[in-house]
Amino acid sequence: MLQTNLKHILTADEHKKFIAENENVMICCGRMGPMCIPVYGIMEDLEGTYKNVSFADMEFDHPESHVIRLAPECKGFMGLPFTVYYKNGKLVKATTSIQSMDQITNILDAQFGKLSENGK
Amino acid sequence: MTETIYDVIIVGAGPAGLTAGIYTSRAKLQTLILNEGTVGGQLVLTHEIANYPGVGSMSGYQLATTMKNQAQSFGCEIKANVNVTGYDFTANPKKVEINSKEAFYGKTIILAPGGLPRMLNIPGENEFKGKGVSYCATCDGDFFTGKEIIVVGGGNSALEEAVSLTKYASKVTIVHQFDHFQAFPHAILEARSNPKIQLIMESELREISGNESVNQVRIENLTSCKIIEAKTDGVFIFIGYIANTKGVEGHITLNKNSEILTDNDMHTNVPGVFAAGDCIAKRYRQVTTAVSDGTIAALNAIEFIRIQQNVN
């Protein structure tokens, strides 16, 4: 299990349930490595403000993480972490390697609507 | 609304900034750390720290987390993942602005923004980041199992990572701009004697290209100016760090490498503004030296405040 304060998704079934039950989802699939830790940190910081988004992590090396590792949108990815965004259960955006706060908030705003538009 | 005036604002939460925060908050000074990325700075980019006295071997993340918890236990406030967008050191208290909208005021400032990995800044580098371009061998090495890759750089990191990547890659080509390496002799020897490693000296990458992922680079020989195209599956870049001082230009004195100039007590040229860690002009950049700088900066900030209080 990853050492983060995010919700941990441990199985493919949990992943399926999580994206089905939450309208807007961001999942970071990685290890406890240098490129992944900053992304988890950003997600932990955003949890308080982006209340319209459900955040979670998934361990890259766990066999059940195939639901992200083998997603068509992640084809060609060769850098950890794989970060995926779901809207109403559909994968709408995927990124590879480390991302900055600005890059992540730009995706959240573009895919799920800006905070002000959500009345937050 | 009443604005809080902090005794000390520290910019940067790497080893230097966190150490300074531990010292000033333990001295009962109201301390705020503002950090542009994740707490820990470059320390979290290190898989294993084996030369930090007293802790044996642990991950950079663990060490950074321990430092952060230690600072917070003394009352130090930390705001991470902010954009520092402005400074005003001319007034008292001094101002640090974040996200172009929120201002914080401090009687003293300790600048410890650390360093940033140097980029090649060539076509394709950004486009293929995570799709063949990598800055972390331990993170991404296994994606290149059985593949041919290029490592750019000639220092210790480049050569050590090139050797470690031979665990995965079928062939590693090191491209370096000089006719000699800057690494320690043992690292050079290890790289030169590895049968999977090939060297291309006095050359620089000019372009990285591909389709879904990297499949080709253009390399220029700097003596003949001849450009060759080479097939490759990945490019790992280890060409050092630059001081992360972009925002403080014009506010304090920097050298030609954009590093902050300090005296031995970590004073900058502005009274009440100190600097510590990888952002300052110095020869050795280690976790231990950053911790030392942070300690010295904090103790001098504490003394600065005490003197100011006595004057007033």
Image (cartoon, coloured by chain):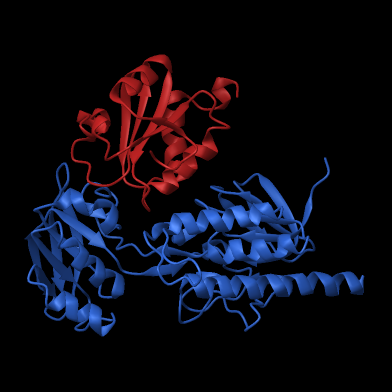
The picture quadrant where one finds residue B171 is bottom left
Question: Residue B70, how many percent across, how many down?
Answer: 62, 56
Image quarter (top left, top right, bottom left or bottom right) of the N terminus of chain B: top right
Q: Is residue A22 left or right of residue B28?
A: left
The relative height of residue B311 versus residue A107 in the rendered view (above or below) is below
Residue sitting at x 30%, y 45% = A80
Q: Which of B163 and B82 is in front in this view?
A: B163
Locate residue A106, reporting x and y percent: 44, 36
Q: Which residue shows up at 39% across the image and 61% down it?
A: B46
- Whether residue B312 appears in this view of the structure is yes
Hue used for the chain lettered A: red
Q: In this view, does B27 lie above or below B183?
A: above
> Viewed as shown, does residue B265 lie left or right of A115?
right
Residue drawn at 28 percent across, 80 percent down: B183
Q: Is residue B223 above or below residue B278?
A: below
Find residue B80 and report its horizontal and vertical position in percent: 57, 48
Quadrant position of the C terminus of chain B in the picture:
bottom right
Q: How many marks?
A: 0
Residue at x 26%, y 55% (from the top left corner): B134
Viewer-closest of B100 and A27: A27
Residue B202 makes an appearance in the image:
no
The part of the image, by quadrant, that contains residue B110 is: bottom right
Q: For residue B30, which quarter of the picture?
A: bottom right
Residue A73 lies, in percent from the top left, at: 23, 31
**Could you say which chain is coloured blue in the image?**
B
